[in-house]
Image (cartoon, helix red, strand yellow):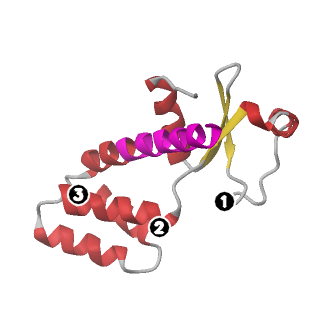
Amino acid sequence: MLSLTEKEVEQLAHQTMKGNICFYQIDKKKIYQMPDDEDYFNYDLTPDEEDILDAIDENPDNYIEFTKMEPAQEHQMMQDFVDRKVKEKALAEDLVNVLSKPKPITGFKFQIEESKYKHDWIEFRTWKYQDWVKEQVDSFNYTED
């Protein structure tokens, strides 16, 4: 059964929030991260990253992969933030409106950056991503049983 330290959870959450894909090497308790190739399709892997991927191919049971949230999950997280934290009706309405338009993440970020809720959003998003990492660990442990 895989168990991570809070520091490992924080590191994985931080990297996946940035859009990186992470691999946790179980036997050495080591974290590797690299840009998600779906977001950086023109990105050339470094020799070290190629070595990591080769090691994963050779022994996939020794690694667990951590990914960022899917767009629908990100959208739900933003909606939850509005519902739980934003008390000003006008701002809440603006944020909900932004979430219904194309590129909602960009619009939401722009609106939040200009508000008094910027720090609250950063804390909320970090907490949700830490929870997301823990869910991925739970899923890994469940499939291992």
Identified at 83% across, 33% down, the residue is 59
* Residues at marks 2 and 1, CA–CA distance in whole angstroms: 16 Å
Which one is earlier in the sequence, the residue at label 2 or at label 3? 2
* Residues at marks 2 and 3, CA–CA distance in whole angstroms: 24 Å
| Residue 1, percent from left and from top | 58, 28
| Residue 36, percent from left and from top | 68, 52
Q: With respect to residue 64, does 44 lie above or below?
A: below
Q: Which mark is residue 39?
A: 1
Specify start and end residues of the magenta stretch as a single range: 127-145
Neighbour class for label 3 at 10 Å: few (<14), some, many (≥20)? Answer: few
Neighbour class for label 1 at 10 Å: few (<14), some, many (≥20)? Answer: few
Identified at 78% across, 59% down, the residue is 42
Question: Does the image show residue 114?
Answer: no
On screen, residue 3 versus residue 34, left or right, reads: left
Q: Which mark is residue 72?
A: 2
Q: Residue beneath label 3, please? A: 115
Three-letter code for the amino acid on which mark 2 is drawn = Ala
Dominant secondary-structure state across the stretch colored magenta: helix
Which one is earlier in the sequence, the residue at label 1 or at label 3? 1
Question: Does the image show residue 70?
Answer: yes
Which one is earlier in the sequence, the residue at label 2 or at label 1? 1
